[in-house]
Image (cartoon, rainbow, N blue to C red):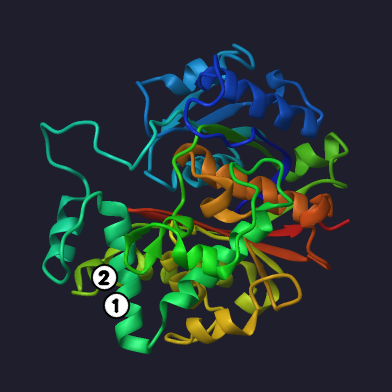
């Protein structure tokens, strides 16, 4: 039987526009988030038995260089790269170490030092991992570069054509997330905009305007995971948050079934969510707060259906109902999401974990959602991997 896994400490930096902070390289970012997580857990680094460190843009063993800012104790340090789901993949691996009894305390750390502007490839002398995905989408959609807004925008257009969703539905998601970010001191952007502001901002790929797209960012996040015996021996039950379900999926054959939504991971998301709901004995209706991967507003809308918040084709109605913000059935992306909080790829999943841990503890300040008993996290990277995690407060 697998061991229970608890989040006992979290920490993150403020997410920043790339290069905004001088003399802020990835070791300094990691030191800041990791030190905060250790302090939150009330432990020293020498109690950590394994570390999993995520980043997308960086040299080999940058994970070791980052962890050495916290201590040099000879523990295994595993470098992780899984595109935009890198942080959650590090979290998944650290949790697996606890579940399997290979460690009683593990660190998941993620960081990114990015270049301004749209994402691009680093190595152009070899096969691109997403080449097949891009080719498949090119067969059903006009081609636009950079690829990311085109891929998610094409899925949004497909939903509009199939179900009658409108540009305003996507813009409402951008308006919601920017409004939520006003209360998040860690967010890269902390400004609200009217719906008309969202619609009138610069068009990136119709229907996606600039204020519906996540920016590149610098930043770091960290989480300390522990076993039940570690929680008990260190008196951490009062702050521990249990991971009650977690799954990672990669592409299925259905990714290439001729639909834009599956090229951007819809079926991966569906299957990961189903596994988590089965593990946790919970359904979508049992969560009060959700942090999900709104790299573009179109992806958030599609995720409402993939995660089971509504039936397929009903996401537009869900947006109009107001059920994904304060006062509704769920509060989705109280942090402001990737659109407003920012998206340093290796740190994103761990920032989501931090936000949900604070929400379950009741310490999210002005962002606090009422009556949080269970929280859901979703993070995806194209090419591809989807990670879904369910959390509940530890039994007292």
Q: Position of residue 329 (x, y in %)?
A: 70, 78
Q: Position of residue 52 (x, y in %)?
A: 51, 32
* Residue at 43%, 59% in the rendered image: 296
Task: Looking at the image, tell me whether mark 1 or mark 2 is earlier in sequence order.
Answer: 1
Q: Which mark is residue 34?
A: none
Q: Position of residue 26 (x, y in %)?
A: 51, 22
Label 2 environment density (alpha carbons within 10 Å; few <14, some 14–19, many ≥20): many
Depicted 183 relative to depicted 67: above or below? below
Quarter occupied by the C terminus:
bottom right
Q: In terms of depth relative to the viewer, which is nearer, 226 or 107?
A: 107
Residue placed under numbered mark 2 in the picture: 260
Do we see residue 108 in this rendering?
no
Q: Nearer the viewer, mark 1 or mark 2?
A: 1
Residue placed under numbered mark 1 in the picture: 158
Quarter occupied by residue 309: bottom right
Question: Left or right: where does residue 39 sit relative to residue 354?
Answer: right
Real-space Cα distance between discs 1 and 2? Answer: 7 Å
């Amino acid at each position: 039987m697998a061991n229970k896994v608890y989040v006992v400490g979290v920490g993150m930096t403020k997410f920043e526009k790339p290069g905004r902070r001088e003399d802020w390289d990835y070791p300094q970012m990691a030191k800041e988030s990791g030190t905060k997580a250790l302090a939150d857990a009330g432990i020293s680094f020498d109690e950590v038995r394994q570390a999993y460190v995520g980043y997308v843009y960086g040299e080999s063993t940058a994970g070791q260089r980052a962890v050495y800012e916290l201590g040099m104790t000879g523990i295994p340090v595993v470098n992780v790269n899984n595109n935009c789901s890198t942080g959650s993949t590090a979290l998944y691996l650290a949790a697996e170490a606890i579940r399997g009894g290979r460690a009683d305390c593990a660190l998941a750390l993620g960081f990114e030092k990015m270049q301004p502007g749209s994402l691009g490839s680093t190595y152009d002398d070899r096969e691109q991992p997403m080449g097949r995905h891009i080719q498949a989408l090119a067969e059903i959609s006009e081609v636009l570069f950079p690829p990311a807004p085109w891929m998610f925008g094409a899925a949004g257009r497909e939903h509009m054509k199939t179900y009658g969703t409108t540009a305003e539905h996507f813009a409402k998601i951008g308006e919601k997330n920017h409004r939520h970010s006003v209360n998040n001191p860690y967010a890269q952007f902390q400004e609200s905009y009217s719906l008309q502001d969202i619609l009138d901002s610069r068009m990136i790929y119709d229907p996606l305007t600039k204020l519906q797209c996540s920016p590149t960012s610098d930043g770091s996040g960290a989480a300390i995971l522990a076993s039940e015996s570690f929680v008990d021996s260190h008196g951490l039950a009062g702050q521990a948050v249990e991971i009650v379900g977690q799954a990672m999926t990669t592409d299925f054959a259905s990714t290439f079934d001729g639909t834009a939504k599956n090229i951007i991971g819809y079926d991966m998301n569906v299957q990961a969510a189903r596994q988590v709901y089965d593990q946790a004995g919970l359904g979508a209706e049992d969560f009060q707060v959700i942090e999900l991967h709104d790299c573009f507003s179109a992806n958030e809308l599609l995720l409402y259906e993939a995660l089971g918040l509504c039936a397929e084709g009903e996401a537009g109605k869900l947006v109009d109902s107001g059920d994904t913000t304060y006062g509704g059935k769920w509060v989705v992306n109280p942090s402001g999401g990737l659109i407003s909080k920012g998206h340093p790829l290796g740190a994103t999943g761990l920032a989501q974990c931090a936000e949900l841990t604070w929400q379950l503890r009741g310490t999210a300040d002005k962002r606090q959602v009422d009556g949080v008993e269970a929280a859901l996290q979703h993070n995806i990277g194209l090419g591809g991997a989807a990670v879904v995690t369910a959390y509940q407060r530890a039994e007292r």
